[in-house]
């Protein structure tokens, strides 16, 4: 007996759906719900962060699952371990705009911390508070409308492709032997970009800050950068004399 073409098509479609369902079931068998939602990330050994406050006490890689908002009176993310990568994953850490809590606070003495790819805004303290952290790397992070500094870091920091806007104090502050590259700092209450000795600032722009646009201490280098409409003149080292001097517009 000849089977109508339409019936054959339905049978093939049913088999295809069954096969796809079976394959998904095999892949998910034995996996936790978290692993099923973020299996790729977990296979890479990353730990999800899905609520605040959150404390990191072990080295490793961590990532945000969604935008996270401060709980009243609570902290943001506290890093109490070295060799940590924090991927904001394109999401925001949002503060309530009160108190002194920081969006990300790193305990003194930790090293090898990397923070990337997202936004930290509206915290009563600093966006990222790490004044005693060496070799901090911050890339692709927007720091906006925090009550203190956008970023405060220790020595040998690398700040790349970041924005600091409308923070209460310094926009981007780093310690000695640091690099601030391809970044922008505008409308902050203090200095736009402030570095320690022997630091490099390259391809940056500062505008409409409440104090200096750029502040570099002895041994620092400032190149290919733009400063305009800041309350005070920039301060950068004079070539060859090792002392800070006041400079005007830098391009």
Image: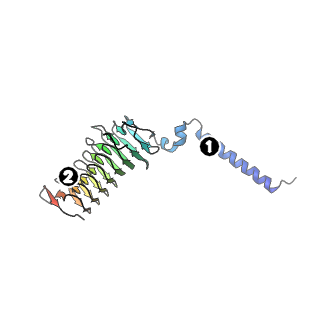
Residue 244 vs residue 249, the one in the foreground: 249
- From what the image shows, is residue 180 above or below residue 76? below
Element under disc 1: helix
Please indicate whether residue 6 sits to the left or right of residue 68 in the image. right
Q: Quadrant of residue 243?
A: bottom left
Residue 193 horizontal/vertical position (percent):
25, 54
- Real-space Cα separation, disc 2 to disc 1, in angstroms: 55 Å
Residue 240 horizontal/vertical position (percent):
13, 59
Residue 50 horizontal/vertical position (percent):
46, 40
Residue 109 horizontal/vertical position (percent):
27, 37
Residue designated by label 1: 24
Residue designated by label 2: 198
Please indicate whether residue 193 sits to the left or right of residue 237 in the image. right
If you read the primary sequence from the N terminus, does the residue marked by circle 2 or circle 1 appear first? 1
Residue at point 26%, 52% (across, down): 189
Element under disc 2: loop
**Residue 17 visible in the picture:** yes
Mark 2 neighbour density, 10 Å: few (under 14) some (14–19) many (20 or more): some
């Amino acid at each position: 007996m000849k089977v109508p073409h339409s019936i054959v098509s339905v049978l093939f479609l049913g088999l295809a759906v069954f096969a796809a369902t079976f394959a998904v079931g095999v892949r998910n068998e034995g996996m936790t719900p978290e692993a099923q939602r973020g299996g790729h990330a977990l296979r890479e050994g990353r730990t999800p962060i899905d609520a605040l406050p959150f404390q990191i006490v072990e080295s490793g890689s961590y990532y945000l699952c969604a935008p996270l908002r401060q709980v009243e009176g609570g902290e943001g993310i506290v890093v109490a371990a070295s060799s940590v990568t924090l991927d904001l994953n394109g999401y925001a850490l949002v503060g309530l705009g009160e108190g002194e809590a920081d969006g990300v606070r790193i305990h003194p003495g930790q090293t090898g911390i990397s923070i990337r790819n997202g936004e930290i805004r509206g915290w009563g303290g600093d966006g990222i508070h790490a004044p005693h952290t060496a070799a901090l790397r911050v890339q692709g992070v927007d720091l906006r409308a925090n009550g203190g500094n956008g970023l405060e870091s220790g020595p040998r920091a690398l700040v790349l492709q970041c924005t600091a806007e409308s923070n209460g104090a310094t926009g981007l502050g780093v310690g000695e032997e640091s690099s601030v590259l391809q970044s922008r700092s505008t409308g902050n209450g203090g200095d736009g970009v402030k570095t320690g000795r022997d630091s490099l600032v390259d391809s940056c722009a500062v505008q409409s800050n409440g104090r200096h646009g750029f502040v570099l201490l002895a041994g620092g280098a400032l190149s290919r950068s733009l400063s305009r409409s800041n309350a005070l003149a920039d301060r950068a080292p004079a070539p060859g004399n090792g002392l800070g001097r006041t400079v005007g517009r830098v391009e």
